[in-house]
Amino acid sequence: MICLKGVGKMVEVILLIAKVFFTFIIYLFIFSIIRLIYLDIKSMNVSKVNLDRGFSTLRLKTKRELLSFKVEDIYVLSKSMTIGRQDKNDIVIKDSFISGIHAQFILENGEVYLKDLDSKNGVFVNEKKLENNNKTLLKDNDIIKIGQIEFIFIKGE
Amino acid sequence: MDENKKIIKILVVMCSIFFIIVAYLTYLQVFQGKKLMENVYNRRNNEIEENTLRGSIFDRNGVVLAYSEKNGESYERIYPYGALYSHVIGYNSKIYGKSLLEANYNGDLLDLDNYSQVFGMIYRESKGNNIYLTLDHRLQELGENLLKDKKGAIVAIDPKKGEVLALVSKPNFDTNSKWLEGNWVSIVESDKALLLPRATQGLYPPGSIFKVITSMGAIENGLDKKTYEDKGKVIIDGYEIKNSGEKVLGNIDIKKALAASSNVVYSEIGVELGGSKLKRLADRIGMNQDISFDIPVNKSIFPYDTMGKNDMAAVAIGQGEILFTPFHMAMITAGIANNGKIMKPILVKSVVSSEEKKIKDVRSNTMYKIMDVETANVIKDMMHEAVENGTGVNAKIEGISVAGKTGTAENHLSEKNKGKEHAWFIGFAPVEDPKIAVAVLVENGGSGGGVSAPIAKEIISEYLQNILKH
Amino acid sequence: MFRKIAYYIPLCMIIFINIIGYAFLAFKEETNNMHAFLVCFLVLAMVFISYVVITKKKFGESYLFLIVSMLLSIGIMMIYRLNSDLAVKQVIWMFVGNVAFFACYYFYIKINKWHKYTNLYIAVPVLLYILTLVFGTTVNGAKNWIIIAGFSFQLSEINKILYVFFLGTYFKNQDKLFFQKSNFSEKNKILINRGLLMFITYLNAGFLVLQRDWGTIALLLLVYLFILYIFSEDNRFLILNCGLLFPTALIGYKFFYHVRVRVEIWIDPWQDVLGKGYQIVQSLFGIGSGGFFGTGLGMGKPYMIPFASTDFIFSAICEEMGTLTGVAVVLLYMLLCYRAFKIALNIKNRFEKIVVLGLALMLGMQTFIIIGGVIKLIPLTGTTLPFVSYGGSSLVTSFIILGILQAISKGDFSNEGEKYG
């Protein structure tokens, strides 16, 4: 009788631990999600910080309401980056007039160059079409047209 | 972006209402969890009960008053003394539920406490806790025999400790399920009000025993130094008030007036005190107030807002519209015996686990202070005289100084000459160091001194001469 | 590298929870262990596959789906404990829901003209209401179910979504939705528009009254007021509407017996423990009997709670998994709401902003209304707990809402902060 009681007690204790563990796991889930969200916010702030660091930027000129796809108001050119429709670009814009990998911004010696990467509809700077695969130096307030979008290039410090 | 600010505000609102839910949920669990678990309507308890050996109930000396026994698949509750404790312990029936102590101590008897609050109800074979009452079975049995077939109540309390020594209500009924469930309809429909625990819930006009309280008011207002002229009857506001048998008592002081139970003197005192003082007196002794006890006690009633002279006179002699439970009267008596302090009444002394571990031990403390020591001493002296040379001589015991007061209360039946008055007696002994206070009520029993005083005498003498010595 | 691991912790927790939960159930003799294992496996498989699709194909934000998956897991576990057949049905609905989720996601992005279908959003609800009134059956005092071939649908669920879309089209260009091209003066145009807005809103509410669906009415009107507060430029209009609501509530209380009963048993259910107060009292008993950590899945008696698998599932969860788990569930919904609001904050397109907010408010308020009701914080109404309660229409509709939220969040670049880092 006594040993049965002992087993009973042990089962009870195991059950207790299991119940606590169950609850614990759910809270761990909640905390991990919160942590991830927090980390994302942090990295978002990082990108905002980059704006202050004096990088060159692309500012959206075209009215957003006229566009049927999503575009940001501002893109920070903190390093060399490509722009195009495919997801593997640094700047992704789902404009049907933009090629898969349309163009590339190149950062060299503090200057920013723009190169057309064999795009279908071309790249225009100040209404002049760029030569294919030839990098062109960008100046402050240049107007860049890619696909249906116009950007103003603002040179950083 | 004014809108975004508003959106954030609404987000804060949403989060707040979610937090309110969390807070309320926590409150529910912490403060109401136990009550919800033990609630009589919670069917989960039925399952627990089926797997639990319900705790036993003992008297103060270990006599078993209720226990459970396995009967095949389930447990059966057995009351060895049948009807004796029907109005104290109550019944525990699968069909008709639980009453009195069985209901109020359900949680302890089934041991529902066991870390259920944190880890939820556990459904397993277990044993409940046992309960020890303050009652003395010998005294309870004696009370039952003394009342025999009469309707009424006997309450005995230890004045210093507040422990209830006997709590008898007649008529009563056998609480064993076999009998109870078969006869339920006739029990409920009986014209004897079988289900009424008269000691704690019966309300009666106190009659002359209330004079003890009127005396309280008189002494505190210096009226005890006066001499009154008792001509056997007096007219107050056109209403005639007579002594018993219209007896003329002459020039007497308050001590003699109490001993002889003079209605004339006391009704005059009542008018002299006036309505507001009487009301405050009633308030001080706990009328119209809940009395917290292990089983339900009805409030004693003092229904007056304004009082005319008739009312003051009537109340002072314990008539009019005031009503008392025998239990409350016993408490007041104990208060007088205890130098003016009424101790909180206790029925359950301790709760002990099935493994003999003490879980709860109850001590009493002062519940009301109804009067000063000096006033108490005067009243004690007056009540002593009432038994020595007054209407309470039938309560005299050789070798023991007994104090008391008789009461023969007019009621609706007696007023119409259709029945007898209620016979009351309250008393305590020994006067110099009271160990027991008693209130006896015999419904429609007639004379307090004739019917109730002898019962009180038996109870007191049995307790002081036999029980306390062993 | 650590970030990568961190991203998979929530998924692992979901897996653990399911395993522990069904392990609890396996201890009971009545459980068919193979069956339980199958259900557990199906749930985890769906969650895993969907999650992988969302993250790998960059369908936007992943937290919404994770939170929902946790809620689903807890819900299905509880339903399985109560009735394994219902759980299987729920798993099937979960599958349908997942399909609906991806379908909605795809179609929402594809058909990018949602802000143009105003008339649809006004007409379809009316149609559905009429359908329900004519062909519907009354369940538990509310006539909002249509039963076809043994399956019951609650059409008013879809109406909630359509109404939010309607609000979106209205507030996109505020007060300029109707009669734009007519000759009325500007002032009159605004008045007519507002009048029509109120008319349509109260028309919806009116139909719901006919259906006796008090919970959804409260939901609809609350969302209406909140959206009005956020997007209306005219405070007086908001105050007018708020003002209208109080007499309406009073009328409801006075004229409808059911409303009175609900309020009475909210104030004191103990006066009629075995009659009208039975449901809420049993719910409270369930919650109280569970303690903070619960009795353990399968060890309590949640079946004593009426409608334990639908309206009162929260009480059942509190009983067997503990009040702390109940609190965790509330926190999960709060996170869901927070996330949806965050998405709304970052959206520039007005229509989509309103839609996201409206849907988030719908989910949040519905949760508050039902949980508040079963714990006796507010009067009880017959709504379901989104993603947790058993119910095909409720589950699928919730997934549709999730799909729309997911689709709109795709355009939100806040998740991809890494690219600019």
Image: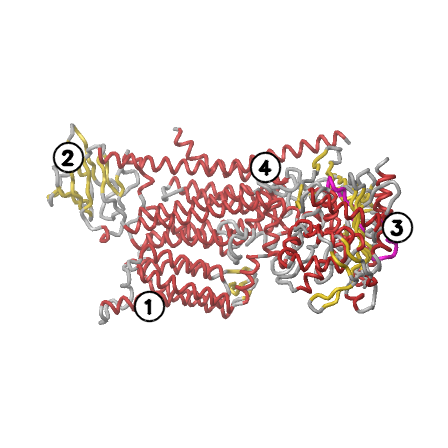
Q: Secondary structure at mark 4?
A: helix
Residue B186 in sight in this render: no
Q: Which residues make up the magenta segment? A: B142-163
* Of labels 4 and 2, the one closer to you: 4
Amino acid type at image mark 2: Lys
Q: Chain of mark 4?
A: A
Viewer-closest of C165 and B252: B252
Do the CB atoms of the residues marked 2 and 3 lie less than 8 Å apart?
no
Query: Up-down: is B173 above or below A20?
Result: below
| CB atoms of marks 4 and 2 within 8 Å | no
Residue marked by disc 1: C195
- Give the Cα separation between the discs numbered 4 and 1: 55 Å
- Location of residue B451 by image quarter: bottom right
Dot 4 and dot 1 within a common chain = no
The amino acid marked with disc number 1 is Gly
Tell me whether the residue at label 4 lies in contact with that at label 1, contact meaning CB atoms closer than 8 angstroms: no
Q: Tell me the residue that label 4 is attached to.
A: A19
C64 versus C164 height, above or below: above
Residue B390 appearing in the image: yes
Q: Residues within 10 Å of mark 2 (few under 14, many from 20)?
A: some
Q: Are marks 4 and 2 on the same chain?
A: yes
Circle 2 residue: A135
Circle 4: residue type: Lys
